Amino acid sequence: MSKKPIILGIESSCDETAVALIRENNEGNPEILSNIVSSQVDIHKEFGGVVPELAARAHVEKIDLIAKKALDESGVNLNDVDAVAATAGPGLIVCLSVGLNFGKAIAASLKKPFIAVNHLEGHALSPKLNSKINYPYLLLLISGGHSQYLNVEGLGKYKRLGTTIDDAVGEAFDKTAKLLGIEFPGGPQIEVLAKRGDPSKFDLPRPIINKGGCNLSFAGLKTAILRITKKIKTRQDKYDLAASFQKTIEEILYKKTKIAFREFKKINKSKKNLFVIAGGVAANKKIRVSLESLSKEENFESVFPPINLCSDNAAMIAMVGLERFKKKQFNNLDFSPKPRWQLDENAAFLKGAGVKI
């Protein structure tokens, strides 16, 4: 029996230092051997957001230890690794450089293939870590820096159907949390507070809800939240605003996803329509329920990564590495970090993270 490939994945695009090892099993499916993530929340919370220089310094200090822990937990000898995959973009360039250079050094010392990975493609393929999914599929990528609908035709083959024209949805969550006085990172706490509130208390704007196809906009919503927070007086008001915000986001994504479904069907004549939702905001349970319900109504099968694989991690980077290793799609060791790197290289410019200027 031939040896199944083992891939070492490295992620350092923002404020998580992560290393993982995955292996293809005898059935041809990926198996996570280890997936270690070191969070920097305690470093950045006093600043209310990620400070790039501090994040990069923490990556430098931790990456050796995280890699050792990942190897120890996996039981894999470093010499048995078949390829090294590292995030090369998009992200903070000072942070990307740490993991990218670390990965190159390991690949060079082992004389093994090196694979530079688009962080967004990691999210796009993350459901493959626990689900058997085939191309094509519709992808909704929702995170702190990205909000996009993409037609995924295959590995490295993406057509953007819609994107945010201003803020990402995860950014809207984080900024709303900050305005409500929730400590960084506050975005995930919005859903918790919303359970105590009345979602009909505040009528919030739904920017470009009836135009722009499946493009998204959240800047106007954020401005409305800012205006309201200056007037609210009680804790219950905060709960009500959190609930109203949560409901508004659900409604925006519900309507825009319905449009994206139609666009996907125009492009693909598949017997089976598949809808993948990935990124940090995909961990929001109420958004999950809403999009699962819509998928059933529209005859789409919805697939989410496990909650622990929604946020940034190295297993998803190793997953891309595994797919590209099997196709012998390797990169040279002089590959430079790409702080802006969109999945659809041919997409027209629209303002938004991950979109080329």
Image: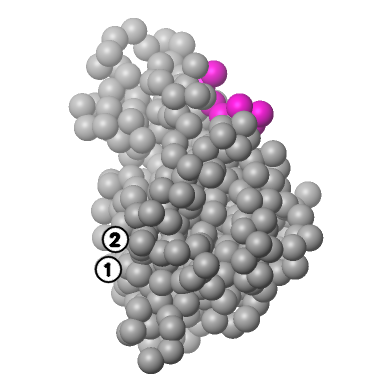
Amino acid residing under circle 2: Glu
Residues tagged 1 and 2 counted as in contact (Cβ below 8 A)? yes
Residue 304, picture quadrant: bottom left
Residue 88 belongs to the span the image colors magenta: no
The residue positioned 28% from the left and 46% from the top of the image is 286
Residue under label 1:
296
Residue 267, picture quadrant: bottom right
Callout 2: 10 Å neighbours few (<14), some, many (20+)? many
Residue 51 belongs to the span the image colors magenta: yes
Residue under label 2:
292
Numbered label tally = 2
Please give the range of residues in magenta: 47-54
Q: Is residue 337 left or right of residue 304?
A: right
Q: Secondary structure at mark 2?
A: helix
Q: Quadrant of the N terminus?
A: bottom left
Callout 1: 10 Å neighbours few (<14), some, many (20+)? few
Horizontal and vertical percent for residue 107? 64, 63
